[in-house]
Amino acid sequence: MPRSSFSALLVFLMVLASLSGPVPVLGELTPVTISEDGVYLRSTPTTTAEALATLKQGTGITLLREGVDEAGSIWFLVRTPQGQEGWVASWLLAFGETRWVVVSEDQLNLREGPGRSSLVITQLNADTLLLLLGEETDEADQLWYQVRTPDGEEGWVASWLVRPGRVSTPPPPPPMPVVVSTPEGQITLIDIYYHWAKENIVAQVQSGLVKGYPDGTFRPDTPLSQAEFYTLLVRLRGLSLQAPPTPTFPDLPPTHWAYAAVETAVRQGYLGKSLPANFQPDAPATRQEIVLAAVRALGLESVALQRPDAFAPFQDEIPPSLAPYVQVAFDCKLVNGYPDSTFRLEGQATRAEAMSILERMKKPAKPGTIYLSRRAVTLAPSRTTTVEFAKVDLKQPNVRSRVFLAHNQVGRLDSMQNLGDANGLSVAIPAAYFDKKSSDPLYPDGPFRYIWGNLENDGTFLTISNEGTSVGFTASNTVTFAPLEVGITGRIIPAKADSRTPSDLNFYLSGMNQPLLSPDSVRLYSPAYGEKVNVGEAKAVVLRQYLVKEIATGTITIPRDGFVIAAPAGTWLYTHFQVGDRVELKYKYSHNVTGQLLPWLDVRTTISAGPRLLKDGRVALNRDEEKFDDSLLASSARRTAIGITGDRVMILLNAMEPLTLAELAQVMLSLGCTDAVNLDGGASTSLYYKGIVVNEPRGSLTNVLGFIED
């Protein structure tokens, strides 16, 4: 073997080693397995050979020899755990960390050590696969490999007499014709069966809007020209063609096949008011072009123009003048981004993309009134910050708010993406603070995370801890900001007269759906907490439909039509409840500093966080009232906030650049808010918008405030 070839092989193997990490020792080698169910073990290396057996996913096999089929793809002769031998395509195997080399000539010596002076153990045939265990150079500075044979023998082989192991990619699937019935008869397309836009293409061909090429192809990934796109758009809208005697564009004369269609599109305003000097009919249509035209054709340009500070939820930069159009097209489900979350405005639109947007234009979703904005805010002469926020118009009767819990239980964790997707939200933002680690002494490893604040849905509280500032929403979307204290008192009504005094029959609850942390805590656990609660050595009063059913200890099942009241063992609580008693609960809503009663009876949704940022159009950072320490007020961090403007537009804001709370209050003022409160930010900072997480949090969340447009 020439020295140059040996050097090239050595470099290749060194690169392979660097990509795969250190060569594992023998005990760490991952076995080769079958990667999917139903893999055939064949008599020869070809897909048409006799199937000797069918192998299940995960079956471990031994590699014996390498072979190739007529197309040059790699196959392996393998041995199954039952000792049966046959051929398997390389792309149907999972290799893990396993690496191997292949004998490149007959009668290769397997030696006891690295060097030609070492004793020969056995001789190996060409194409034998050898498991690679290690490497070493001999006295002549030539590289040798430590290997193991398919029969389990270990030894050393010269590196220049083997080649690196290879795996072939799966062959392309065979053509599958798609027969489409059209008004003019059947059309067979041979290149769309496996394409992502197959259904949209078929729909357009069925309608007669477009046809395939004479050779039976549709060529879905071929760019679409400007002339082709506007012709299809005019056909889709069913417009009567207009062919004025004087052309609008010098490069599109009346003799051009698309002249009438393009002139019709011009007169319909599909190309906008500022027309280009030339049309360039044969130039590829860009994604920008089809988005602008689609929004205009659907009569939604006025919606886009009402969103001057809108931005589209994609990773690549979209100019402010175009962002409202892209956002409206996204809201109407006409367009999506690429897997890397980019939109690529200047990218050439393919025939498949055009067919998809035209099909979606037949039944577009409503753009809604909730939308995303981005704005640069000046904080000081030399300091500007850019924030993203959603605008929610609470004057719209179809907009409703709701708290959403991870897995529909208090204190569990889930991703922002799952919370938004599972509940069909238009927009969502982190709400109440929570402990990042398990905070229940009875569940030191989780799954419970303490939620810090009051949360309420449909007029029923999910958590009560009476801390920070609460924001409440009524059914008619009026909003109240206040340091809310929810007091819950209870009265026991005995089933029959007994010796208990009136004072024995009254009690007070100190919280809801939170751990029993202090000796005098009395908690209520509702079905929102989960199926069970572990009260340890404490006892629990189990109620169904406000009737005491039992008094128990340990792990208690929470009735779906009731709740559990629990307190540490030894308190007075358990001597005053008896099975059969009826219980009445009374809620009191008051200011947690002044004690003044608050108008909370009509509130249906409540979240709590803090501190408050704005009150009646002025900065309202009050450390004493909300009992936040000075370090929180002074520190800078990523921020989340909620505020309301004078015309009842709710602002849900993310500041990804670290801000102090004073700076955050300044930002909310600049956006027109009169009242605002700081929400759970830092690592939780995130914003969900119609299927996309605009800013990804650095972990999971327990709760979010979401808005839905019915």
Image: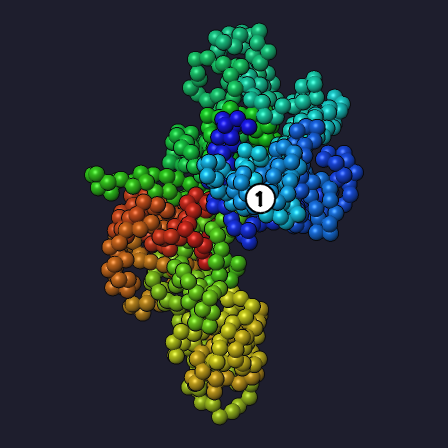
| Residue 335 image point, x, y percent | 53, 34
Q: How many marks?
A: 1
Q: Which residue is mark 1?
A: 119
Coordinates of residue 381 in the picture (x, y in percent): 20, 39
**Residue 1 vertical placement versus 574 (above, below):** above
Quarter of the figure with residue 243:
top right
Q: Can I make out residue 229 in this image?
A: no
Give the vertical position of 688 relative to 11 (above or below): below
Q: Amino acid at mark 1?
A: Leu
**Which sits in the foreground, 441 or 498?**
441
Q: Horizontal placement of 106 versus 454: left or right?
A: right
Residue lying furthest left: 381
Q: Residues within 10 Å of mark 1 (few under 14, many from 20)?
A: some
**Residue placed at 65% from the left, 32% from the top?**
73
Q: Position of residue 219 (x, y in %)?
A: 63, 23
Left of 654 or right of it: where is 290? right
Along the line of sight, which residue is nearer the eye, 299 or 222? 222
Q: Residue at x 52, y 50 (%)?
A: 25
SS at badge 1: loop
Q: Residue 122: x percent and y percent? A: 64, 43
Q: Residue 358 is drawn in which quadrant?
A: top right
Q: In the picture, which quadrant includes the N terminus? A: top right
Q: Is residue 437 above or below residue 324?
A: below
Q: Measured along the vertical axis of the image, is residue 73 above or below residue 680? A: above
Query: Left of 551 or right of it: where is 305?
Result: left
- Look at 70% across and 18% down and name the residue there: 215
